Each structure stands twice: as structure tokens, then as C-alpha cells.
Image (cartoon, rainbow, N blue to C red):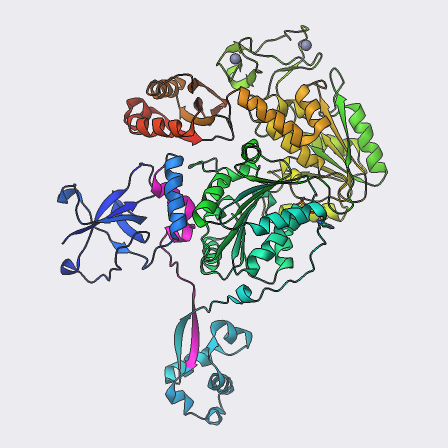
Amino acid sequence: MSLFVEVALPVPMRQNFTYRVKTNEQNDDSPQAKPQIGVRVKVPFGRQQLIGLVTAITDSCDLAPTQLKSVIEFIDDAPLLPESLYKLTLWAARYYFCSQGQMLTQALPVALRKGLDAAPQKIQYWQITTIGSNIAPETLKRAPAQKKLLEHLKQTSLTQEEVISLELNKTALKTLEEKGWIAQHEKIAQLNLDWRSQLELDETPHRLNKEQAVAVTVLTQQQGYHCTLLEGITGSGKTEVYLALLEHILKQGKQALILVPEIGLTPQTINRFKRRFRVNVAVLHSGLTDNQRLEAWRQARCGQAAIIIGTRSALFTPMAFPGVIILDEEHDSSFKQQEGVGYHARDLAVMRGHLESIPVVLGSATPSLESLQNALSGRYHHLQLGERAGNAKKVRQGIIDIKNLPLKAGMSAPLINEIRSHLDAGNQVLLFLNRRGFAPALLCHECGHLHECDRCDAFFTVHQSLGEIRCHHCGNQYAIPRQCHNCGSTMLMGQGIGTEQLAEALQLEFPKYPVVRIDRDTTRLKGSLESHLSAIHKGEYKILVGTQMLAKGHHFPDVTLVGLLDVDGALFSADFRAPERFGQLYTQVAGRAGRANKLGTVLLQTHQSDNPILRDLLHRGYGEFARSQLKERQMALLPPAWHMVLVRAEAHSALDADNFLNSFASLLPQDKEFEIIGPMPAPLDRKAGKFRRQLMFQAKHRHRLQQEFERIYPLVEQLPEAKRCRWSLDRDPQDLL
Ligand code: ADP
Ligand code: ZN
Ligand code: ZN
């Protein structure tokens, strides 16, 4: 009988591949594990060998025997992932329009993709043989090192680690082995699951305030799948709620998976969980070596690690005893993968909760509109914490209208004066400037006029390299005007200043007060963020300049003034998520001020002091602001009300990219419930010499979007134009760049 397996391979083709399994009669020497769904196999693919996962086993195959190749090797003797995670990758591959092999590549640690052993680590140890046990140590008087070893081994076996920690001689060990008195054996590291029966706390929890107690009661009563949005203002004690929930989950002998944003995975965060419970905590982040990552993965899979903390991709970590998934700062955009398969860890976490029948908690001070909609519509439970825990005070906020004011490296005189008075009072000042992620609008410095599309209710985006302004809602375009359309001034601004320039200017202005800059450039080296942060805490720096890296999680008790310099660029970009992002950023940054007993002040500079979005945010706070934004999205047929797919194409010639996207668009219907916008240049329209174009799809119904794209995908792959550019699909895009 012949046997075939279908294999998911890490290649972009959206299909699995069939291989023949060598049966026993044809057997050569290679020992073969039995084919099973979910085990890894090594197979020939073109001229290379690839490792994939078996997705099906059949006894017939339509392909001609000459077209078939054989499996080289089955690597595992049991499926690598629990069924729930296997199903999750299947579901995700369909949802994100990629191959199952590509999705599995996201889900598995690199070391496993390379073929390393997934079983728990084996430990080498030495044991005395029968001959050895009949030897009296006294006969080794002249070899004291061997004598000492023999004495030890007569009592108990020794692992490599114990040999080292007891400072025993390794040469003597070899000699005894050669004499046949001792022998080396291998065993699987013993599983320690004591935490499941006997959970020990290392610190006494805070006494929960009323809101926290209500939240904990609701969460600990949940059985099976539930999704809950925990909306709690900065400093309201969300982490304390997680910890109380964790205690409840761990006490039942179940594990917890905690996902945090990339910037949020600091030693401070990890320590808060480590300090509370005397259990193993597995930490998964991008700084680990492949082997360290595999080890953390194994610890989670066998149940040795009770708590698993990690960034986006840790979502796929298997748990022996799944108990709960918590996503902290659920609004954070780092949960969405930008390169390759654009999966969203939040959405997949909710799906995983379903598949494993466990609760999922999404926490944030500034929830995403997606989660907020689900909470308001009743799909998710909704818990709110509106009070700051402990005794922290509210902040004072103000707007500085910088229309027509002279600016020094982006700073107005009122801001500089305020900085001076806070510094002279012995406090720290944080200045925030974020240029990433927001494409600039065209702004007049004299009158504050923003240049708006004459066909849409949207602002133009400046494309310096094209010398054009473009509307990203309709594709309308003009040459960059020389004069303001409102007042005729020639002082039009499209580009702002960067953090480096700002830090320099501050140091000149305030030579007595040391300045530190925190952004991607200054924190590239491992550990440099931590050392900067600790220097800030010691008061070595008085002025902090940074990008959004400074906005998250950190507590700066001596910061009393937070200044936001470049609000306009953030507010009026082409990206429909810009107001939401700005609201989140502003609220998070403002949350840095006045955390301890000192009163905090937040000042923001803008040309648009009357802007309704800004007013709304400052007067009513993020919660109300987000709710009105959600209504606007609904009216504009934008996510989360409608569903979106972005097709990106880049090519050496803009025409090639446009042609491809036009052909792509022509394959799809256009009607009242299915809209196509573009092709148009990406906000970042040229990158590394390539032209970048995009096409946007908005559909009223999720399943219709799914159906249409599944129908046309094979046709798109066949398009001759597809060969002339690089293209990709981004489902639920977070960044239109
Ligand atoms: P969040 O995660 O919402 O920003 P945290 O859990 O970090 O808030 O809490 C903010 C601060 O308040 C922390 O220093 C925390 O130790 C403290 N805190 C939290 N809950 C309480 C409580 N019930 N009583 C006293 N202090 C608390
Ligand atoms: Zn327009
Ligand atoms: Zn003007």
C-alpha cells in the first residue's frame, strides 16, 4: 500500500505539498517515525530541503508518480502543537490569506523550524557501576580527586551541574569512566509541577479598592471562554487586577499567558510578576537566542512555567494547562505584525481563547476602537477603573497656540518659560516628539490653515519627493502650493524637526540641566534603555526628550511637566487612525506626569487650538473621545464598523505597480457594500528607489470580504502584471504607510 502526506511548507504559495512516504518494504536504513498529523518532516523542495508540518495523510494521490518526491525524515514522534494551536494557525492562514506553512512559521520558534528536538531537555548524569560499588575508596589514596568522586557517587548520582558546583575534577571523572567504575546516563529533566498543588506568594497583595475588587470578582467567576475589556485609566491599578486574577488561576493549577507590547516588556514589568508568585516565569522576547527561546517554549509546553510573558509572537506558545490569556496595553500597534504575515496578536488571542475555552482579558487605559466597539456592543464584557490607585493626583493640562509665534527648535517661548520654572524647582521635564508613523499635512504657520481636499473632508498629505500634495481618500493631487490658500503666506510647513535637533537646542538653552534623548537611535544597544532609565530615576538627567518609547509603562516620579511639541503632524495625517492614535499617545504621555505626590502639568503646542478633536480629547478625556470617534468611523464606513484590506505593491516603475493594482481591482465587484479606493501612492511613496502604491478595499460584511478574496486570489497570482512587482495583502491594516 502506498502512503502520502500533505505538508505545509514555509513558502508563499498558498497551498500544501504532497510527498510519498517510504513504506517498510522499500525501507533503507533510515529509521522512520510514523506519519501523524502535526509532526515535522524534512522534505526535498526544488534544490533545497525544507522542514514542514504534516497536515494530512492519504493513501491515494492524483499526481503522476514521477512528479512525486519522498519524505526524507519524520522528525517528531508526537504532534508539535496542541490541537487548539494547530487549529488556530489553520484559521489564521485563511483569515490573513497566507499559506498554512507561512502561518506555522510564525507560530514556531526558529530552533524548531530548523529541526531541533522539541522534547524536554535531557540531562546527563554519572552513576556508579556494579564494579565501582565494590571498590573501596581507600584504594585510591594516591588519587585524591578520584577518591573524592567515588565517595560522592557511592552516595548518589551526579549531574554535570553538580560536578561543577561541587568543584569535582573532570579528568578524574573521565578516568573512573574508563576504568568502568562509573557510567554516564541520560534522563529527561524532572518536571517540577509543585506550583500546581501548592502556590506560594512572595509578597502581600495591595488591598484592592472597590473598583478593582469588582473587576476581580467578575473575572474570577468566569468559566470557559469569555473576553473582557478592562478599561482603566493610567495608574488605576490594572496590573494589580491581573495579579489577583493570576493568583486565582494559578491556584487552580492552570497557566497564564501575558502578552505585552514590545516597549512594555521591561525588567520592571517582568519583576512585578516574578515578585508576587514563587513560580517559574518563562519570558519570550526578541532578545533571546534561538535556544533560549526554545527552552522557554518547552517550559511552557510541559507546564513547568506557570506564567509565560512575551511580546506578539509569544501568543503561539503552547500551554499544558491553559488558564487565561491577558493582553496588556491591548491598543498597542506592536501587536500587529507589519512585515510578512500581518497577523494581529489581539485578534488571534481572542480566537485562541475560544479554541482553548479559557478567558481572555484585554487591558488598556486607552482601548482601541475595535475593542471598544466589541465591549459597547456586548460581545465582550466591559469593566472600568476610573480612579487612580494609591494617592496619585490628576494632571493640569493646557494648550499653547503657536500660530505665528517664533519657534526655537520647535519650542515656543511660553513652553520654554514653563520648562525653566519646573527645572528651577528641582523637578524633571519630559518633552515628547513623535515623527514616526504620521505623514505630514500641509500647514500654514501664519494662519494655521490646513490644506484640505476640495473633493473630500480630508487633509492633503505632503509628498516631498513627488513635489505633490495628495488626498488619500480620493487620489486628488496638486503640486505643493507656494502660498497658503487662506492668507497667502509663504510660510508653509510640511516637515517638522527631530528629537536630535531638539535635544541639542535644549542643552544650549539650559546648560545647567543634563539632557537625555530616548528614541530608537539612542537605545539600539542591548541594555541601553535600562541604563538610561535608571539614570533618569537617579536624577542624573533633568530633561528627557523622547519618542513614544517614553510613553509607555515607565514611572517617572520626579517628572512634573510633560510637553508635546508636534501635535499637528499627528492629528492631521492621512491615516484614518491618526486621531485615535493621537488620543492614545496623548493620554499615555500625560499619564507620565504627576504619578507620585507631585502635581503634574501637560502642555501641548498646536496651530489648531480650536480643533474639535483636540478640544474633545482634552475636555472629556480619552474614554468619551474614543466613543465619539467610533461614531465617526461608523459614519465614514471605516473600521471597525467596516472591514478593510490593503493591497500594497512596489516596483521600480510606478506604472508597473499601478497596472497590477488596476488589474487586481478589476477582478472584484464594486457596489454599495464593497468599495475600492485607489490605486494611489502610499503615504511613504518612494522607498529604497522603489515606487510604492496601494489599493484599499472596504467591505460592510466580513464574510463577503473573505469570500471575494478567496475567489480571486488564484486569479491574482496568475496575473502577468504580478510578476513585475512585489505585492502583499494586509488584512485589518493598522498603518497605511
Ligand atoms: P496600571 O497598570 O493601571 O497603570 P498599576 O497596577 O501599575 O496601574 O498601579 C499603579 C500604582 O498604584 C502602582 O504603584 C501600584 O503598586 C499601586 N496600586 C495599585 N493598586 C493599589 C491599591 N489597591 N492600593 C494601593 N496602591 C495600589
Ligand atoms: Zn479627496
Ligand atoms: Zn495661511
Count of numbered tags: 0
Range covered by the magenta-colored residues: 98-127
Instruction: Residue 407: tell me if it is visible.
Output: yes
Q: Quadrant of residue 176?
A: bottom left
Judged left or right of residue 460, residue 678 is: left
- Viewport quadrant of the N terminus: bottom left
Between 309 and 521, which is closer to the camera in this rendering? 309
Between 736 and 356, which is closer to the camera in this rendering? 356
Ligand 3 occupies quarter: top right
Between 431 and 53, which is closer to the camera in this rendering? 53
Percent position of residue 543, x then y: 75, 38
Judged left or right of residue 179, residue 515 is: right
Name the residue: 66% across, 62% down.
202
Above/below status of 717 relative to 485? below
Q: Is residue 108 magenta?
A: yes
Above/below status of 49 relative to 133? above
Above/below status of 724 relative to 548? above
Name the residue: 45% across, 60% down.
302
Percent position of residue 337, x then y: 48, 38
Name the residue: 43% across, 50% down.
109
